[in-house]
Each structure stands twice: as structure tokens, then as C-alpha cells.
Image (tube, helix red, strand yellow):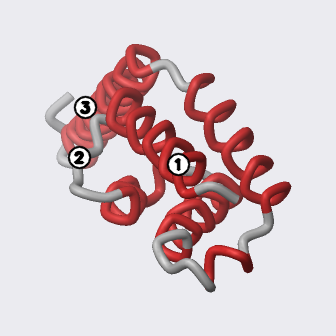
Amino acid sequence: MKIVSVDSYADDVAALLTKQFSVKGKSLEKRIKRSGRLLPGYVRKDAQYIAESQKLSQHPKLARMLDEKKLAKSHKTCVSYLKSVDPNERRKGLFMSILGSVAFAIFVSGALFIAFLVWRDLV
């Protein structure tokens, strides 16, 4: 496998991680590590395989060990998942989750306050 194609695969995945999740880092490995739970396990595993392949491709003898089909499949999996993620929808979901938690906390606090008033015969 050519070094250029492994590097281009790694660059594609790294660019999409930055674009979709706003994850920054010097290398693909750092970006994968910083993405944490944002990536599903199968995508993280494939992205790590691409990062390891990029390291192996720098050594002429070790570069022969790379599996081109698995590398292409890993790249396709990562790119297809990362392109399907909508950053705006992620933000909306996060905002709605926080808003729901706050609303629930206010509701429970109000119910406890009313229960306290009834318990103390103030209502």
C-alpha cells in the first residue's frame, strides 16, 4: 500500500472529526482520544486502526503488513458515520437535555415544597 493513501485516509478522518465534533489535536490519535464517547465503539476501533496503519506505513518493511481491504473498509465506515452526524442537531439535543433536566428539577422542587406546606398544615 502506498504511504500517500494511508495518510490521505487519516487526514480525511481527522478533518471530519474536527468538522463534526470540534475535536482538535495534532494527530489522528489525539483527536480520537479527545472524541471519547462521542464516537461509537466500532467507529473508534476503525479510526484507531487507521491511526496505527499510518504509523506502520512510515516504516518500509512494516508497511507491507498493512491490509488494504481492511484499511479501506475502516475508512469507509469512519467517513460514512462522521458525515451522517449533524453538529447543529447535536447542539439542539444537548440543549434540550439540559432544559429537560432543569424543568424536572423545578417540578420536583415545587412538588416537595407543596408537600411540605401540606405536611405543616399551612395550606
Note whether 62 is above or below 46 in the view shown. below
Q: Is residue 7 left or right of residue 70?
A: left
Check disc 2 and report its element: helix, strand or loop.
loop
Q: Which residue is mark 1?
A: 4
Check disc 1 and report its element: helix, strand or loop.
helix
Q: Which residue is mark 2?
A: 24
Give the distance between the C-alpha atoms of the residues marked 2 and 1, in whole angstroms.
22 Å
Is residue 111 something one can see in this rendering? Answer: no
Query: Where, by quadrant of the figure, is residue 60 drawn?
Result: bottom right
Note whether 30 is above or below 73 in the view shown. below
Q: Nearer the viewer, residue 27 or 54?
A: 54
Say what amino acid the circle numbered 2 marks: Lys
Note whether 41 is above or below 73 in the view shown. below
Q: Nearer the viewer, residue 83 or 85?
A: 83
Say what amino acid the circle numbered 3 marks: Ile
Q: Nearer the viewer, residue 116 or 36?
A: 36
Marked residue nearer the N-terminal end (2 or 1): 1
Who's the residue at 41% across and 29% down the image? 20
Disc 3 to disc 1: CB gap under 8 Å: no
- Crowd band around label 2 with a 10 angstrom C-alpha radius: few (<14), some (14–19), many (20+): some
Q: How many marks?
A: 3
Q: Position of residue 12 (x, y in %)?
A: 49, 37
